[in-house]
Image (cartoon, rainbow, N blue to C red):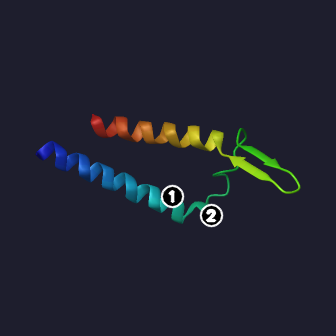
Amino acid sequence: MSEFGRQLIVIGLIVVAVGVVFSFSDRIPWLGRLPGDISIKRENFSFYFPLATSILLSLVLSLILWLLRR
């Protein structure tokens, strides 16, 4: 049961970290506007897919989780 408790704590910390990033995302000017993010704007249509931002966040989260496992 001790391992399950640790996993819940780690998941909770990750949720808190994501919440902090969302709260302060407007103060990080480059987040969401990296080269590689796809943005298509037409007259009646706009599409935005943050591909590079998603890859960067995935790498950062993978590194953090890897460090926590050690």
Q: Which residue is mark 1?
A: 21
Image position, residue 3 (x, y; %): 16, 42
Q: Residue furthest front?
A: 44
Q: Looking at the picture, does residue 5 appear above or below residue 20?
A: above
Residue found farthest to the left: 1
Name the residue rendered at 74%, 49% in the picture.
47
**Which percent across, then down, holds residue 55?**
57, 37
Q: Secondary structure at mark 1?
A: helix
Judging depth in this view, the residue of 48 and 3 nearest the camera is 48
The disc labelled 1 sits on which kind of residue? Val
Asked if the residue under mark 2 is in contact with the one under mark 1, i.e. CB atoms within 8 Å, the reply is: no
Q: Whole-percent x and y of residue 56?
A: 56, 40
Sequence-wise first label, 1 or 2: 1
**Local secondary structure at mark 2:** helix
| CA gap, disc 1 and disc 2 | 9 Å
Mark 2, Cα crowd under 10 Å, few <14 / some 14-19 / many 20+, is: few
Which of the 4 image quarters holds residue 49?
top right
Pointer 2 residue: 26
Picture residue at 47% right of the left edge, 62% below the top: 20
Q: Quadrant of the N terminus?
A: top left
Name which residue lies at 73% across and 40% down. 35
